Image: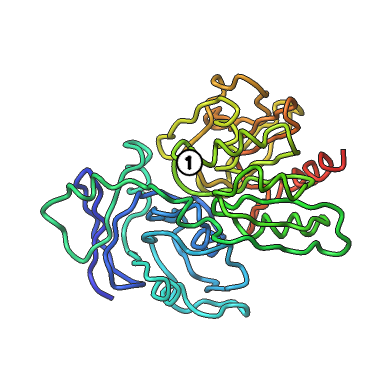
Amino acid sequence: MSKAYLILSDGTVYEGEGFGAPVSCVGELVFNTGVVGYIETLTDPSYCGQIVMQTFPQVGNYGIIEEDFEGQCAIRGYVVREWCPEPSNFRSQYTLDEFLKRQGVPGLWGVDTRAITQRIREMGVMNAMISDHIPDDLSALRAYAVTGGVAAVGAKARSVYPATGEKRRAVTLIDYGTKRNIIRELCARGCEVTVVPPDTKAEAILADHPDGVMLSNGPGDPAENTGCIAEIKKLLGKVPMFGLCLGHQMMALAAGGQTVKLKYGHRGGNQPVIDVAAGHAYITSQNHGYAVVSESLPVGRVRFVNANDNTCEGVDYPEYNAFSVQFHPEACAGPRDTSQLFDRFVGMMKG
């Protein structure tokens, strides 16, 4: 191990030890409050372009298990208080350090992640660098922005996943950076899932006559994806639709709404959400830095709100036979409080 630094765009420097790939990186620094699920975090394409910091103090204690990967690793860097070099888990294949080396991702440990998290909460999300030295000029760091994420991590070609057991429905999933467990949840409910690239035209999707269309999660600013939003607009009202995370945000934009960047976002497995229609509360897994502006929606009705900051967490569009949520009902490693939303989607297709 060698000395390394986390340099924030405001000039703040934290000294720690490097691990993982011996390279430098620049990215948007975000924190994740999950106690478990670091494998899923590391392989969630929605983190494209970001340096991820875990608030839980020890990470890597159950090793790396490739069966649990959610997609391709797209993070720029990884920051932890302490990493475990000797994981204890019968499923473990190798260490966190080895994973980062294989992915070419630099890591930093031995820093006060609590203090860094508090700074982000006070100042807002900012850019950061992991490096073995402190540069004199921070202009490139300050100018960095996460762009082109959907094109970078979305599917490059069409693929088909068979239903588990008898095929009951056919779903087209538009892949903006999807997590594999979304596909598993649909297949487990008798859906044959056709995954298509993010730039697929609406006409090509409708030509397949799917029973429903799923809009996946993905990285970056939703408003950047003007081409994708235009195609979603063509699909609204033509086929039952379900949007998750980035898909939720882009569905709102296609319906005429607006989105806004949050001060530090929601990332972790402990976000409380209220179903305003049923009066129920759920604990959800989330990973997003943008939110739909509820008051901007010309159609639909807000169905879910965040209990902490009252931001929009889900919208029903009865006009279009569609709905969307900001959180992850397919969450793996959990919580799974809202997995019944997949049943709701299947029910819409049957109707």
The picture places residue 322, in percent across and down from the top left corner, at 72, 34
Asked where in the image residue 254 lies, by quadrant, the reply is top right
Color scheme of the displayed model: rainbow
Quadrant of the drawing holding the C terminus: top right
Residue appearing at x 59%, y 39% in the figure: 231
Closest to the observer: 219 or 233? 233
Residue appearing at x 57%, y 54% in the figure: 197
Which residue is identified by label 1?
A: 225
Is residue 340 visible in the rendered structure shown here?
yes
Query: How many other residues sit within 10 Å of disc 1, few (<14), some (14-19) or many (≥20)?
Result: some
Quadrant of the drawing holding the N terminus: bottom left
On screen, residue 71 versus residue 163, left or right, reads: left
Residue appearing at x 16%, y 58% in the figure: 134
Q: Is residue 43 positioned above or below 291 on the image?
A: below
The picture places residue 152, in percent across and down from the top left corner, at 45, 56
Is residue 249 visible in the rendered structure shown here?
no
Tell me the kind of residue under disc 1. Asn
The picture places residue 318, in percent across and down from the top left corner, at 75, 27
Q: Is residue 267 positioned above or below 76 on the image?
A: above
Closest to the observer: 313 or 345? 345
The picture places residue 171, in percent across and down from the top left corner, at 75, 51
On screen, residue 126 versus residue 242, left or right, reads: left
Q: Is residue 79 positioned above or below 87 on the image?
A: above
- The residue furthest left is 136
Q: Please, what secondary structure does the residue beneath circle 1 have?
A: loop
Q: Is residue 349 positioned above or below 55 on the image?
A: above
Please count the marks in the image.
Answer: 1
Residue appearing at x 76%, y 48% in the figure: 210
